[in-house]
Image (cartoon, rainbow, N blue to C red):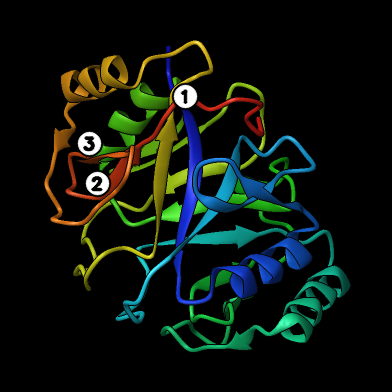
Amino acid sequence: MASHLLALFDANNPPHLARFWAGFLGWELTDDPHDGLALLPNDDTGFRIRFLPTQEQKAGQNRMHFDLTSKSLEDQQQTVARALGLGARHIDIGQLPEEGHVVLADPEGNEFCVIEPGNNFLADCGFIGALACDGSQEVGYFWSEALGWPLVWDQDQETAIRSPHGGPKVTWGGPPLMPRAGRDRLRFDLAPSADGDQQAEVERLVSLGAKRIDTGRDEGSRVVMADPDGNEFCVGRPLHSAGG
């Protein structure tokens, strides 16, 4: 059985960053039984978000970010204003003036986009339209199998998957891939289902193309792995009452 997906932020100040995203998304902030702080979705988003402490400072652009949707230009402006009011800021990552999306960064510099209305690709995905990732076609296939989420886009080496229950898409933009600037601050975590087994899940992921890696860090009960693109992720203990 496939694991539950979690989005994991490394944060210099986890409570502060968690409060920003809780306020911005309107999700419930709760103590996670294993890893400190978590946000639980209030919609059909098929993952929860965790925040873990780190001493490392952000270096370079994240290789994964959230795309938020808009119903109208006014709605887009209100979303941007709400984010700015909570502590976000405008940033320039090379977007063109004629592009309709707005690029922002959260209080710790993690990039996210507020997409203009009329985006057909994200039309029925909810407020979080996508978790947009830098990655190859191969890695899109891997995560489709790992999560049991079907491919909903596979064209020109770009891929996207989506939970069978709906919610956001997870997308990979294909080559060329961005250079890696240290450990990814926003990345995936996996947790087996309540009746699952961590070691069995690790073995299943290895059979799909993942590798176990030794980071030299104490990850507690989580097993550190890398997907076919070398992106680090962890497999934790079975997750109870998962959000989605």
Which mark, by number, is residue 175?
none
The residue wearing badge 1 is 238
Earlier residue among tags 3 and 1: 3
The residue wearing badge 2 is 136
- Separation of residues labelled 3 and 1 (CA atoms): 27 Å
Q: Residue at point 43% right, 83% down? A: 93
What amino acid type should be assigned to the residue bearing mark 1?
Answer: Pro
Question: Is the residue 55 above or below the residue 10 in the image?
Answer: below
Density class for disc 1 (Cα within 10 Å; few <14, some 14-19, many ≥20) is some
Of the 4 image quadrants, the one containing the C terminus is: top right
- Separation of residues labelled 2 and 1 (CA atoms): 29 Å
Question: Is the residue 112 above or below the residue 151 in the image?
Answer: below
Measuring from the top left, give residue 224's x and y in whole percent.
24, 42
Q: Is residue 223 visible?
A: yes
Question: Is the residue 241 above or below the residue 19 in the image?
Answer: above
Q: Residue at point 14% right, 36% down? A: 212
Circle 1 sits in a helix, a strand or a loop, which is it? loop
Which of 132 and 157 lies nearest the eye of the viewer? 132
Quadrant in which residue 66 is drawn? bottom right
Q: Nearer the viewer, mark 2 or mark 1?
A: 1
Earlier residue among tags 2 and 1: 2
Density class for disc 3 (Cα within 10 Å; few <14, some 14-19, many ≥20) is some
Measuring from the top left, give residue 100's x and y in whole percent.
64, 75
Which mark, by number, is residue 138?
3
Marks 2/3 in contact by CB < 8 Å: the verdict is yes
Q: Is residue 101 visible?
A: no
- Separation of residues labelled 2 and 3 (CA atoms): 5 Å
Circle 2 sits in a helix, a strand or a loop, which is it? loop
